Amino acid sequence: IAREAYEFGCLISIGLEEIEGFERHFALVKSCYTDYAAVLPESENQQQLQGLNLLGLLAQSKIAEFHTELELIPVDLRENQYIKFPIKLEQYLMEGTYRKVEEAQKQVPAPSYSYFVSKLSGTVRDSIADSSEAAYESLPLADALKMLSMKSADELSDYAAMREREWEVDTKNNVVRFRATNTADLSVPSKKLIIETLSYAKELERIV
C-alpha cells in the first residue's frame, strides 16, 4: 500500500508540475523497488516511474545523476519503452542531433512524460545557444530568434541575461553579437549548424 501511495504521489506531483514533489516521492518509492524487491511483486508502474525520473534528470541537465540512476537499472530492462526513451534522448543531446530530439518528442511513451519533455525543450535551447556562441562571432537577429524559437529581441535579451550570457542584441543593426573577437578554432560547420537548428526550431515551435 505504501508503494502505491508513493507512486501515486509521483504522478500527482508531475500533474501539478512540482519537480521537488516528484523527486521526494520517487526517493521513497525507489527504496520500495530496491529494498523490497525480493518480497513485493514488481509494480506495473515501476519502469514508467524510473524512466520518468531519468527524463527529469535529463531535463534539468543533471547528466551525472542521470548516469548514476541508469546504472541501477538492469541492462535487460533498458529496452523497455519507458527506460529506452530517456536513454535515446540523452544520446541525441550528447551528439547534438537536435532533429532526432524533435522526432523523439512526438513519441512519448506515456502522458506523464509530457511535462519533462516540454522542460527538455529548454535544455535543447541552451544546447543550441552554446553551439551558436561557440561557432559564431555574430548572427542576424532573425536567424538567432528562429534558432532559439523566440519571438522578439526583448525575449532574446531576457534569455541572455537570465543565463548570464554576454550577448549584445543590437536591434538597430539587427544582429546578435556573441563575443568581441572571433579567435576560436571553429569545429562546427556554420552552414550546417544554421540549417539544422533552424529546422529544429521550426518543429519545436509547432510541438510545444
Image (spheres, rainbow, N blue to C red):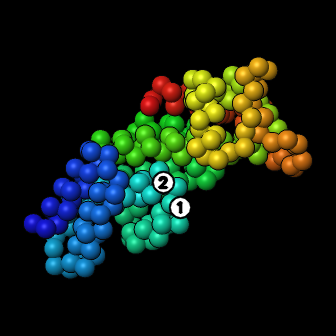
> Which residue position is annotated with label 2?
60
Residue 186 badge: none
Bin the neighbour count of mark 1 within 10 Å (Cα to Cα): few under 14, some 14-19, many 20 and up.
some
Q: Residue at x 77, y 39 (%)?
A: 178
**Kind of residue indicated by mark 2:** Gln
How far across and how far down the image is residue 199, in percent? Answer: 62, 28
Seen in the image, is 6 located left or right of residue 122? left
Question: What residue is rendered at 37% in x and 58% in y?
Answer: 53
Quadrant (top left/top right/bottom left/bottom right) for the C terminus: top left
Asked whether residue 67 is in view, the answer is yes
Of residues 121 and 70, the one drawn nearer to the viewer in this rendering: 121
Residue, x 31% and y 50% (percent of image)?
18
- SS under mark 1: helix
- Residue occupied by mark 1: 63
Q: Amino acid at mark 1?
A: Ile
Q: Does residue 146 appear in this view?
A: no
